[in-house]
Image (cartoon, grey):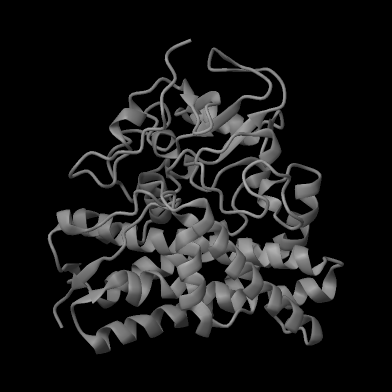
């Protein structure tokens, strides 16, 4: 076996949208040293990643696997069984029970019903940008508040508290905070959601939490953890896609005219791969041969999604952004198998509306600072930009 690698995370200077060079140079399956000393595996090929995400011989339960990072933002810490309702770290059939309860809230039909409200939220923030005049930070003015407001309305969370939960989720998503900092942020957010659940128990409203309270036998702890998961996932990833995606489009202005292509959003998801730091990861429940390597029972396998989504065996000219690409939907940005992103249809609609309306309203949109001054979220679970100063011809 080759010498184990540590997870490559460093981007090349001047290439903010490309995977770490040391990541794409690796073979499809490489031995990798985890922070706790475990020698597991890192996969970088599309075929290997798909197997790990879909094959039931690989488990997502934390007590079976070793964490990619030493800081863990979930109840119970790194290696404890998942807390009730924390279904993202469960296997079937336990995971299936929770997902069935939630899937009706995220169907294509349900998201279609939400679309007029998403359009209105988007337009309201574009109106506010136009009124404020250039320059503005697109992250604070648009990319962050739009998906935050959408998920707040869907869950029944007060948007007035968005600054509080955004602060906590930013800490939870960081990989360079201490475990105490992450645990404190998780605790604050958990208490906030628990109080909300208790209030809604007394008077359920017509929102996702209200529906779960009325139509299921979920406990308060389960409801709290489900809401916590959806709140974090529902704005953190989409907000970073809107910010980083706009940055990418401004650096590739020839692509903006193709934003109305059917798979434009899919191509941005593939090209940017914002879930970028060796996740999702799985543990082998038995010996599995993967791309000629024997993965032993108990081995943890991490997935390098930025390399997976640039696999030249799957994507023609993978390092080129092509919004009219015909093979973009093969990307793995939403994961796969039973853990494929529950809110992917909502994310697609938010991005499609967000990008098209933004550039339709501000066709002269441009960076207000040199591209090299844009600070990137390299040490966060979701890759993106911390701020994106933009200007336009007012």
Question: Along the horizontal axis of the image, is 161 left or right of 362?
Answer: right
Quadrant holding the C terminus = bottom left
Q: Quadrant of residue 355?
A: bottom left
Q: In the image as oriented, which residue stretches furthest toward the front?
A: 180
Q: Residue at x 28, y 70 (%)?
A: 359
Residue 323 rendering spot, x and y as whole percentages: 33, 51
Residue 157 percent across, percent down from the top left? 61, 79
Q: Is residue 80 left or right of residue 347?
A: right
Q: Residue at x 66, y 41 (%)?
A: 79
Residue 285 can be seen in this image? yes
Q: Is residue 97 left or right of residue 164?
A: right
Between 354 and 143, the one nearer to me in the picture? 143
Q: Is residue 108 visible?
A: no
Q: Residue furthest top?
A: 1
Residue 229, x across and y down, in percent: 62, 61
Q: Which residue is depicted at the point 42% across and 69% down?
A: 353
Observer-nearest residue: 122 or 23? 23
The tally of labels here is: 0
Q: Is residue 300 above or below residue 344?
A: above
Residue 82 image position (x, y, % from top left): 72, 49
């Amino acid at each position: 076996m080759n010498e184990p690698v540590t997870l490559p995370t460093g981007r090349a200077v001047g290439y903010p949208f490309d995977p770490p060079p040391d990541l794409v140079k690796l073979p499809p399956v490489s031995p990798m040293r985890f922070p706790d000393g475990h020698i597991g595996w890192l996969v970088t090929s599309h075929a290997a990643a798909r197997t790990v995400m879909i094959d039931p011989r690989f488990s997502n339960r934390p007590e079976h696997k070793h964490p990619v990072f030493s800081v863990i933002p979930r109840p119970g810490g790194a290696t404890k069984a998942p807390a009730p309702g924390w279904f993202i770290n469960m296997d079937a059939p336990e995971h299936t029970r929770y997902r069935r309860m939630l899937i009706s809230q995220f169907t294509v039909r349900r998201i279609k019903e939400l679309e007029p409200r998403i359009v209105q939220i988007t337009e309201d923030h574009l109106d506010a940008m136009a009124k404020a005049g250039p320059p503005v930070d697109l992250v604070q003015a648009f990319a962050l508040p739009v998906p935050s407001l959408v998920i707040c309305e869907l869950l029944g969370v007060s948007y007035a508290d968005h600054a509080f939960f955004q602060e906590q989720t930013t800490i939870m998503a960081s990989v360079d905070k201490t475990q105490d900092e992450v645990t404190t942020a998780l605790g604050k957010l958990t208490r906030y959601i628990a109080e909300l659940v208790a209030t809604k128990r007394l008077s359920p409203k017509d929102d996702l939490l209200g529906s779960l309270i009325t139509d299921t036998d979920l406990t308060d702890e389960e409801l709290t953890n489900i809401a916590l998961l959806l709140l974090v996932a529902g704005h953190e990833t989409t907000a970073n896609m809107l910010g980083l995606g706009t940055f990418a489009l401004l650096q590739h202005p020839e692509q903006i005219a193709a934003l109305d292509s059917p798979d434009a959003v899919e191509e941005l998801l593939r090209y940017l791969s914002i879930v970028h730091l060796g996740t999702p990861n799985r543990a082998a429940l038995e010996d599995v041969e993967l791309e000629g390597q024997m993965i032993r029972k108990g081995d943890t396998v991490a997935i390098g999604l930025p390399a997976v989504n640039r696999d030249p065996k799957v994507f023609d000219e993978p390092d080129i952004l092509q919004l009219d690409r015909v093979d973009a939907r093969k990307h793995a940005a939403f994961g796969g198998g039973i853990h494929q992103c529950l809110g992917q249809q909502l994310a697609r609609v938010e991005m499609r509306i967000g990008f098209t309306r933004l550039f339709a309203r501000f066709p002269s949109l441009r960076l207000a600072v040199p591209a090299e001054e844009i600070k990137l979220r390299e040490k966060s679970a979701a890759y993106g930009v911390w701020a994106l100063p933009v200007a336009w011809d007012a």
